[in-house]
Image (spheres, rainbow, N blue to C red):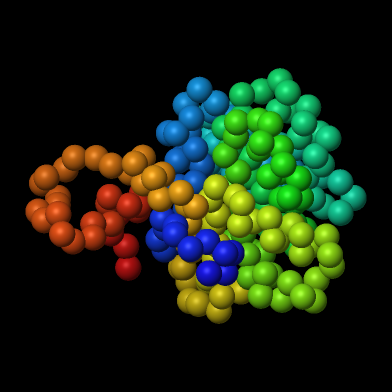
Amino acid sequence: GLFGWETVLGHLTGGGTLANLEALWAGRELHPDRPAIVASTDAHYTHARMARLLGVPFIPVPVGADGAMNLDALDRVLDRTAVGTVVATVGTTGWGAIDPVDGLVARRDRYPFRLHADAAYGGYFTLIRERLSRTARLRLEAVCACDSLAIDPHKHGLQPYGCGAILFRDPAVGSVYRHDSPYTYFTSSELHLGEISLECSRP
């Protein structure tokens, strides 16, 4: 696949915002004892909005001169806060900056957070990675170690609106979607969107 994942859980969404929401919601459900969400100050504004929607704290982390998350500032947050999800922006809207995903992966070994890649804008950069700087290539290559990622085929994937996608590296995350509604699902052999997504039915 595009990011080297062979077995994943995922589906299309109405766009990147909902794809990111599903990842943040899954993180809250999986780790209710670590509710805080962290993203850079240059991350998409909807992450703060979604944190309010989910009823969890949102902590913005400053960026460096390159527009990417400052890891020293992140360390200070991780040392004092119960962080459940760190959002790695792969292509900021303003600058196209890629957060230091490789450094975030290394920190996940020390701190118990989920690492989500918001690759809605920059995920398709991986198709031209040979033309990018060594730093950008290393950051893109590290996306394969993230726990989840959102990507927007209706951006650089050249697909029509609205076409986002959410992918989870561990299919066991699907347990957060499970519920019992026999009035909706009459057979167990068919794929029911309500059992694998927040949106349920969609165009």
Q: Is residue 46 in view from this perspective?
A: no
In the picture as drawn, the residue positioned furthest to the right comes out as: 65
Q: Which of the pair 3/14 is nearer the observer?
A: 3
Residue at 41 percent of width and 44 percent of height: 173
Q: Looking at the image, which is closer to me, 49 or 70?
A: 70
As drawn, 125 above or below 195: below
List x then y, in percent, for residue 35.
54, 28
Which of the 4 quarters of the picture holds residue 59?
A: top right
User: Closer to the camera, 88 or 18?
Assistant: 88
Residue found 23% across the figure and 57% down from its top: 192
- Tell me if residue 89 can be seen: yes
Pinpoint residue 16: horizontal percent, then vertical percent: 53, 58
Q: Give the quadrant of residue 112.
A: top right
- Total count of labels: 0
Q: Position of residue 149 (x, y in %)?
A: 55, 54
Name which residue lies at 70% across and 28% down: 78
Q: Is residue 94 left or right of residue 12?
A: right
Q: Residue at x 35, y 52 (%)?
A: 197
Picture quadrant of residue 90: bottom right
Q: Is residue 46 left or right of residue 173?
A: right
- Taking 100 as reference, is 160 above or below it? below
167 horizontally vs 36: left or right: left
The x, y position of residue 69, in whole percent, is 78, 45
